[in-house]
Image (cartoon, grey):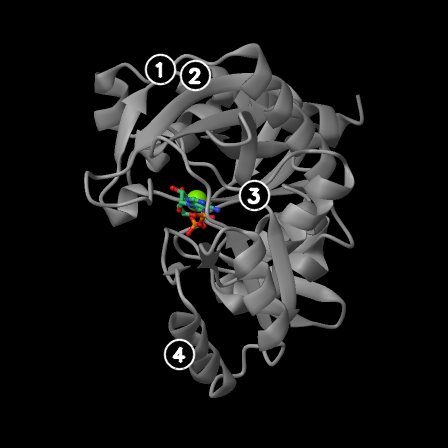
Amino acid sequence: MTGHTIGMWMYQNSGGDQIQRKMVEQLKERDIHTVTGLDLRDAIAKNGQIICHDRVMEDLDLFFSYNAGEQTLYQVYLYSMLSHTIPTVNSYSAFEISEDKFKTAHLLNRHGINTADYELCHKEDLMVLKKTMHDWGGKMIYKPTDGWGGMGLLKIENESALDMLSSFLKKTDIREFYVERFIKYDNTDFRIDIVNGEFVSCYGRKAPDNDWKTNVTSGGSVIMREANDAVVDIAKKAAAVTGLDIAGVDLIYDEEKEEYVVLEVNGIPAFATPEQEKMGLNFNDKKIALIVDLIETKVKGL
Ligand SMILES: Nc1ncnc2c1ncn2[C@@H]1O[C@H](COP(=O)(O)OP(=O)(O)O)[C@@H](O)[C@H]1O
Ligand SMILES: [Mg+2]
């Protein structure tokens, strides 16, 4: 048998099916065959093999996992195991960091990359948090460390709000209390996509009038926005530090400290949807080409 075979699990909504088709075609031109639709939720594991849709996953040359919306704990569990045997994009260890807000902020800080000031403590350490809130000028944001889409974020502006959240957390099995300083910014952000260390695209999001969250899922809207050297440089560093081959780095400009800060690094940053492409977001082909190069490099050991 000649050539290589990779597995792919890619989101199909919002134009994902077309992106997949283009990737499969371009990989084929390089003698790389793709088995699509390998949702590990359907897999079983036994006798040293993970079997998904009659495929032995470990026999593939690489697994490309790109479906944030349909991720299940079971799927992620098998992804973590699979990554010990074959290369995956993204690598599981990088993906795992990017899925956790504390781990991302902590690692970026260790490498001198600005994030929002953050603090993690045991959920019972209320006195520590009260002092921190005071040090930060009385405003902070509670974030579930594994949240997404702006969900579960809570702005805390006084001690009674902190007490209420604390008594709620005590009743849950959440161990940690993760907070960030509330940053004064213009309610817009930057999303910078990086693939294999290279700049792909820049766009932004704007929060709705009465909100400080830019997430599209909380009513934010996508805006066209030019990159600048500073944000591109930070985004490249953030991708490198987290180890993500494909990264979507979110930044905002802190008006008090007068610097850009990284808010999060996304390990499965979406391609532009057909509607966004009509707005002028035209980075999909560049991103596809860079991902195809990346996969080829990995499977052929170039
Ligand atoms: N420390 C902060 N200060 C001010 N606004 C913030 C802060 N952290 C997050 N936000 C706003 O909330 C949104 C969601 O936060 P984020 O950490 O990206 O969580 P999610 O994973 O839910 O998107 C951000 O896009 C930003 O608009
Ligand atoms: Mg976000």
CA gap between label 2 and label 4 equals 48 Å
Q: Is residue 149 in view?
A: yes
Q: Going 54% across and 77% down the picture, which residue do you hit?
A: 174
- Asked if disc 2 and disc 1 are in contact, CB closer than 8 Å, the reply is yes
Report the quarter where the C terminus lies. top right
Report whether residue 43 is seen. Answer: no
Residue 180 position, x and y percent, is 53, 53
**Residue where numbered disc 3 is placed:** 116
Q: Secondary structure at mark 2?
A: helix
What number is the disc on residue 293?
none
Instruction: Report whether the residue tagged 4 is closer than 8 Å to ligand 1.
Output: no
Alpha carbon separation for disc pair 3 and 2 = 33 Å
Q: Is mark 3 within 8 Å of ligand 1?
A: yes
Residue lying at 39% horizontally and 29% vertically, measured from the top left: 19
Q: In the image, what residue occupies the spot 41% across and 17% down?
A: 283
Marks 3, 1: nearer the viewer: 3
Badge 1 amino acid: Asn
Cα distance, mark 3 to mark 1?
30 Å
Residue that label 1 marks: 282
Q: Which residue is mark 2?
A: 285
Q: Position of 69 compared to 137: left or right? A: left
Near mark 1 (Cα within 10 A), the count class, few <14, some 14-19 or many ≥20, is some
